[in-house]
């Protein structure tokens, strides 16, 4: 059966790329090459071996991908929000674990030090973090309730010029490889953030094993047993849930872009496979059943691309609202996980191996759809916005 050449990019039917600036396209192309050349050739084995490819950190840092939106005075690239989104999209086209590493380092660790830290803290940590020499983790979630951070059990008490922290955190990306932890704890003055360095007496981590998702990522528990830190390690410029929640908004923004990359990877895999898989004398791409599924994937990817691009433009203009981030995270992660599952189905038996990306992306997305706000939480955030009634 003759194949009619398409004048459109199957992964970009609305030519969303034409809406990007030359600089934005350059950033996307640079990260895409890194993903194609360095991530994709090894990531299946890393997932299989439950190993985070830490050997990639120096190159990730050299490209300016850590703290990419922060000012140059701290050794960062001062990129736009759209550029950061494109970085997330291309990295997650490789694997959610790689994008998660960059998201946590940039949005959950470097951002709070920049936004809420002292001048001394910024100068001490941010340049080394941008170079990938200091790795951070974000300690907010606790074992008894991720969706209700206000019900925090970890606490910090003043003791002279120090603070003493007790408690635990769970499901912490980068925890076992981090040099510092941004730890949120309840104090008599409300929730506050602290920078706890690795090796501080009483601070311990334990990696979570036997994961079936984000296997190419380090996920850990953090434990604090009378951990004493000086007041100079407290983030001085924020109190209350506003601090950690504003960090999560930054990270969720990147997550709206990341799953687009995962969906594109699954879609491209299955599109090529469907042209070469011959059943009953013709490629399955020539069947109505498969074409309907492929067309639906293209439709949903296109809508997600436009959604995140507009969100990025709003963010760069200073007009982005948290509800808009919730809507985009809900839509785009749901889009990606549905495409991963449909792609796995089209691949048949071949789809259960890491030789093809959909099963790996699908399993990773089971975490992405849960962390930094479950799908249900984001649905309720949108519901609260449009009705004015809090249903939490």
Image: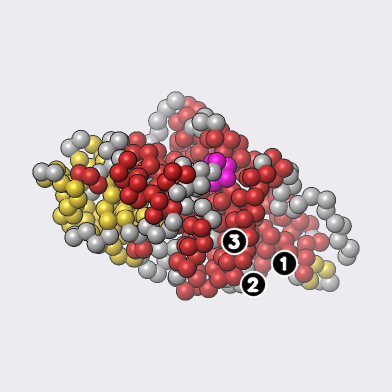
Compared to residue 279, the image places residue 198 above or below, namely above
- Identify which residue, 167 or 16, lies in the foreground: 16
The residues bearing labels 3 and 2 have C-alpha atoms spaced at a distance of 26 Å
Marking on residue 350 = 2
Residue 61 at x, y percent in the picture: 48, 57
The residues bearing labels 2 and 1 have C-alpha atoms spaced at a distance of 10 Å
Read off the residue under disc 3. 34
The answer to whether the residues at label 3 and label 2 have Cβ atoms under 8 Å apart is no
Occupied quadrant, residue 160: top left
In the rendered image, residue 21 lying in the magenta stretch gets the answer no
Residue at 52% across / 62% down in the picture? 59
Rendered-image quadrant of the N terminus: bottom right
Read off the residue under disc 1. 273
Q: Is residue 9 left or right of residue 327?
A: right
Q: Is residue 369 left or right of residue 37?
A: left
Q: How many marks?
A: 3
Occupied quadrant, residue 193: top left
Residue at 23% across / 36% down in the picture? 190
């Amino acid at each position: 059966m003759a194949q009619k050449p398409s004048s459109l990019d199957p992964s970009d039917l609305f030519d969303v790329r034409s809406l990007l600036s030359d600089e934005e396209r350059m950033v996307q192309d640079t990260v895409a090459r890194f993903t194609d050349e360095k991530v994709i050739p090894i990531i299946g084995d890393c997932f299989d071996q439950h190993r985070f490819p830490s050997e990639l950190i120096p190159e990730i840092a050299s490209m300016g991908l850590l703290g990419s939106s922060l000012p140059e005075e701290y050794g960062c690239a001062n990129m736009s929000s759209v550029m950061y989104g494109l970085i997330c999209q291309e990295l997650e086209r490789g694997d959610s674990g790689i994008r998660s590493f960059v998201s946590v380092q940039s949005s959950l660790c470097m951002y709070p030090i920049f936004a809420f830290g002292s001048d001394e803290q910024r100068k001490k940590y941010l340049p080394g973090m941008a170079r990938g020499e200091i790795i951070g983790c974000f300690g907010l979630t606790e074992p008894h309730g991720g969706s209700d951070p206000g019900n925090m059990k970890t606490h910090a008490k003043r003791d002279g010029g120090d603070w003493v922290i007790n408690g635990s955190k769970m499901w912490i990306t980068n925890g076992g490889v981090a040099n510092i932890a941004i730890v949120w704890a309840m104090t008599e003055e409300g929730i506050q953030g602290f920078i706890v360095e690795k090796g501080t007496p009483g601070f311990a981590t334990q990696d979570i094993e036997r994961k079936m998702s984000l296997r190419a990522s380090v996920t850990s528990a953090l434990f604090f047993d009378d951990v004493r830190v000086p007041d100079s390690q407290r983030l001085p410029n924020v109190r209350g849930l506003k601090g950690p929640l504003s960090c999560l908004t930054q990270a969720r923004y990147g997550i709206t872009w990341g799953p687009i990359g995962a969906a594109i990877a699954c879609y491209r895999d299955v599109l090529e496979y469907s042209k070469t898989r011959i059943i009953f004398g013709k490629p399955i791409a020539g069947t109505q059943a498969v074409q309907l599924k492929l067309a639906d994937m293209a439709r949903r990817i296109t809508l997600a691309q436009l959604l995140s691009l507009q969100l990025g433009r709003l963010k760069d203009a200073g007009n982005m609202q948290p509800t808009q981030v919730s809507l985009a995270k809900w839509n785009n992660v749901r889009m990606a996980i549905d495409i991963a599952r449909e792609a796995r189905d089209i691949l048949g038996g071949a789809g259960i191996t890491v030789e093809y990306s959909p099963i790996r992306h699908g399993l990773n997305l089971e975490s992405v759809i849960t962390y930094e706000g479950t799908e249900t939480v984001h649905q309720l955030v949108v519901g609260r916005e449009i009705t004015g009634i809090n249903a939490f």
